[in-house]
Amino acid sequence: MNFRYRLHGLVAIAGLLVLATGAPAHAQTGPVKVGLVLSLTGPFAATGKQIEAGARLYLTRHGDTMAGRKIEFVVKDDGGLPDQAKRIAQEMVVNDKVDVLGGFVLTPLALAVAPVASQSKTPAIVMSAGTSSVIDASPFFVRVSFTLPQNSVGVAEWAPRNGIKSVVTLVSDYGPGIDAELSFKKRFEASGGAVKEAIRVPVRNPDFSPFLQKVRDEKPDAVFVFLPAGVGTQFMKQFASRGLDKAGIRLIGTGDVTEDDILNDMGDVALGVVTSHHYSAAHPSPENQAFVEAFKKANGGKRPNYMAVAGYDGMRVLSHALKATGGKGGEPLLNAMKGQSFDSPRGPVQIDPQTRDIVQNVYIRRVERKEGELYNVEFDVMKAVRDPGRGN
Ligand code: PHB
C-alpha cells in the first residue's frame, strides 16, 4: 500500500470513529458558535423573532465575549416544519460546527432536533417547546422556557376558589395542548371543579367559531384555553363576536393566550381575563423593568414576551456555563448548565440538575389597563414550581 492510500485509510477510519462515537470536532478556541433553529417565517414567525431578539439583547447588555471567546450566532429559519428543523440542525453541527444549539419554537421542532443533539453530543437550549416530555427526547437538552403543566396548575387552583366550578377546556390539538388539558383537569377537579367537555382545535389556521358555539351551548362558568403564542388575538375576537362574554362565560387559561407581544392589540375583550404564567412584561422587579426598557430600546418600542425572556436567559445560562468550563464545549458545558440558579426578568429560576428542566414561579394575573396599555397584572404566585407533568 503506498502512502496516499494509507492516508486515505486513516482518514476514513477517523471518520468512522467520529460517526461511531458521535464525538464532534468542536473547537475549544475561536468563537463560540450558537446555532439558533427558529421559525422566522410562517404562522409562528413572531415567536422566533422574539427569541432571537432576546438572545441578542443578552449580548448587548453583557458583552459578546464569554470566557474569552466571542459569541457568534448562526440563525436559520425552520419555517415551522420539523423536517426542515432537523436538516438545519444537522447543517449547523456538520458544516457550521456550532458548539451549542438553541431555539425550537414548537414541540415537534424540538423533537425533530433531539437526535441531532444526542448523536453529535451538542448541548441544546430549549427556548420555547413546552410539552413536558420534550426534555426526555435528548440528554443534551436543557430547558429555559416553561412547561404547560407548570403553567396550567396555577389557574386550575385559583378558579374554584373564585366561583368557577364548571369549565370547558379548549386547546390546540398537539403535545402542549394535551399537556395543558390533562394537567388543568387533574388539578381543577382535585380542587373541587368539574370539566364538562374537552375540545381540541387544529394547530394550523383554526376557525374557532364552531368550537366556541359548542362552548356556549355547554354554559360552563368558564372556558380554559391553551393556544400557542401568536394565536390569541384571533381567538379573542371570535370569543367576543360569538357573544360568549355577554353570555357570562369567563375566560381563563395559560398566559400564552394573552401574551405580551399581542395583548395590547386585543382590545377591551381581554380585560379581566385571568391566566397563570411564568412571565409578564409588567412583573414589578427592577431586573424586569431594566430588561423591558432595554428590549424596547433595541426593538423599536416592541414589548418583550416570554419567548424573548427565554432567549435572554438561554444566553445567560450559556455564558455562566462557559465561565465554569473555561470556554470548553460538549459534555462539560452541558454539565455546567445544570443546577444554575439566578434572578431572571421573570423572577428567581433554577435549572434542575437532575431533570435539566426549569423550576420557576408561576404567577396568577389579570388583564388590566395601565397607563393606557393592556398588561397581565400579577396578583398571586405559586413559588418554585417544578414541572408537574413528570410526576413531581
Ligand atoms: C410548543 O409547541 O411547545 C409551544 C409553542 C408556543 C407556546 C407554548 C408551547 O406558547
Image (cartoon, rainbow, N blue to C red):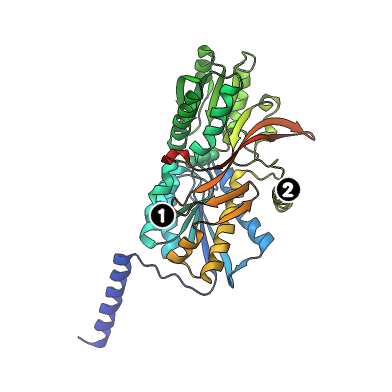
Q: Which residue is mark 2?
A: 289
Q: Is residue 185 visible?
A: yes
Q: For mark 1, what is the residue?
A: 87
Task: Tell me the quarter of the picture where residue 87 sits.
Answer: bottom left
On screen, 123 above or below 365?
A: below
Residue 247 location (% of width, % of height):
61, 13
Tell which residue pokes out farthest to the left in this image. 1
Amino acid type shown at disc 1: Arg
Q: Along the line of sight, which residue is nearer the eye, 373 or 167?
A: 167
- Report the side of 229 relative to 367 (left or right): left
Separation of marks 2 and 1 at Cα, in angstroms: 38 Å
Helix, strand, or loop for circle 1?
helix
Residue 54 x/y as whole percent: 62, 52
Residue at 68 percent across and 60 percent down: it is 60
**Residue type, label 2:** Gln
Q: Secondary structure at mark 2?
A: helix
Q: Earlier in the sequence, mark 2 or mark 1?
A: 1
Q: Nearer the viewer, residue 325 or 291?
A: 325
Q: Is residue 96 visible?
A: no
Q: In the figure, 72 relative to 276: above or below?
A: below
Quadrant occupied by the C terminus? top left
Question: Pointer 2 and pointer 1: residues touching (CB < 8 Å)?
Answer: no
* In the displayed structure image, the side of residue 271 where residue 223 appears, left or right: left
The answer to which of 71 and 40 lies nearer the viewer is: 71
Mark 2 residue's CB less than 8 Å from ligand 1: no
Whether residue 311 is situated above or below residue 146 in the rendered picture: below
Determine crowd level at label 1: few under 14, some 14-19, many 20+ residues with C-alpha closer than 10 A: some
Of badges 2 and 1, nearer the viewer stands 2
